[in-house]
Amino acid sequence: MTATIAQYIGKVNPKIYADKGEELVKKYGYADWIPVEEIKEKPLSEHGLVYDSSSETLEPVYFFILDLMNDFGLQTEKLIDNFSSSPGSGHFAELGQRATIMQQQASKILGDVNAVLRSVLNIIYDLKEFRLRLQQYDDFKSDKKEAAVLALKQIWMDKVDINKGNSSIKAMALGQAGYQTLLDAFLFVKDVGDVDNVDLNDRVKRILRARILEFNHWLEQSEKELRKRYELEKTYLRSQVNSLKLYTRWAKPYLKAAQQLEMAEKGREPALVKAFNTIILELTLLGKRKIDVGEEALSGNLPGDFKKLKTKDYYACVLIDFRFRGIPQRVSQQAHYAFGGRADISFKSYVLNEDELKKLDEEIDASDLSDALRLVEGATTESLEQLQEEINFFLEEKEKQENLKTSADTSNPFKALIGGYDKRPVQEKKPEKAAEKEKAKIKPETYAEKNYLRPLTEKNAQELAFKLFDIYKKAHGMPSYT
């Protein structure tokens, strides 16, 4: 069974908002270790309304209270929005079809995402191979020239000369009599002019001279072609990455819509009879209003010294739970439904400071309430972020080289006179991997916060909850329970 927001608030501050909270803390040793299902909620105050009308729609009930919360200056957010229809209702079939369409569209786009992702992976592997090959050409122009030439000759024999078949250097050296020295001679001789200085028979020299000339031409042309192919591959990688970002952006709305059209599991809910035309809606709103310490001190609700104190922000919070049991009725000649039925509404008051609000957000994010959204992010954003480091390495490579050239060209010849070159150049910081988000910590309350600020906020929260309850009750003449 899914825990309620009131239970999560009880876990954040069990000593105040959980029934027998101190016993739970002693039992488990720490508030974070208390299973949320064991918490029995204990708000500061609670009021309830019941509205039952099968002929009138339920939307005005919700929007009247939402607008009323905004009129009281509350910052309101929706934390829970669940629904479940009985299998025999037309609403179940209608939303099932819509969910299927969203799932099919998302599945199709995710197929394109996977295809582009495979393409990106192949390009990255190709670029790594090109980079290894180009490194040998760079070594050829450095003090590692001798080793680089031997490596390039080996590549030429394995990739180019091998296509000659029985007339290739390796085939002749290893399989034909009289040419056993051809392979060693090819690796030893550096230029065509050096062939005559080697102690070889004329038959081997004639073949060696042609192969050395051919290798030198290949060495010059292959580097140009390889660098050109390397740049083209990087350009193609950029286009594929842009396509991947575009596809993931297209997939997200369909994935989220499909998740939002999923019905909550309510197997033992007595109101959902399979053959009935019934729907259950669950909504939870949390409204919060920050206490202005300076203004409260000026009005005399707090001691005047509070204007100078540095305290945590405290919020008067109202938690409103809606539970609708409705009868979905299709609006004539339209593709949506109107809901009439019974609405049970509860108004609960709480006081949460800034640390407790952060902890509440953390608990909700870690709960099963946001599991589906994490799956959406995992199917789209994370698939690209895992490759981002390698992608950035290749796409930003050219910019780094241009920056190095610019810094070299603009060097100051007089800088050495003032010791400028003695300082080590500032190294570019490597992008650090995103660290795991630290868990929110609730700092202990000060004496002023515990004995003055919290009691004042509690009073405001209780008054807010009662006003919302009372105004709506009087405006609609509803029966109430407390």
Image (cartoon, rainbow, N blue to C red):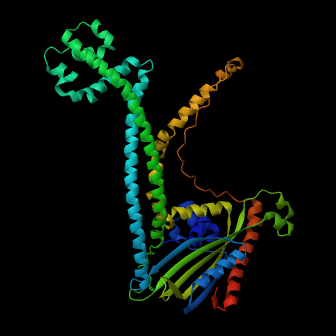
**Residue visible at 56% across and 60% down in the picture:** 32
Name the quadrant containing residue 113. bottom left
Task: Using residue 118 as the reference point, say whether residue 459 is left or right of it.
Answer: right
Task: Using residue 203 as the reference point, say whether residue 401 is left or right of it.
Answer: right
In the rendered image, residue 346, in percent from the top left (x then y), is placed at 61, 81
Which one is nearer the viewer's eye here, 234 or 12? Answer: 234
| Whether residue 387 is visible | yes
Q: With respect to residue 115, does 476 lie above or below?
A: below
Which one is nearer the viewer's eye here, 63 or 212? Answer: 212
In the rendered image, residue 64, in percent from the top left (x then y), is placed at 65, 82
In the rendered image, residue 234, in percent from the top left (x then y), is placed at 44, 41
Name the quadrant containing residue 307. bottom right
In the rendered image, residue 289, in percent from the top left (x then y), is placed at 71, 69
**Residue visible at 27% across and 25% down in the picture:** 157
Which one is nearer the viewer's eye here, 143 or 424? Answer: 143
Q: Quadrant of the C terminus?
A: bottom right
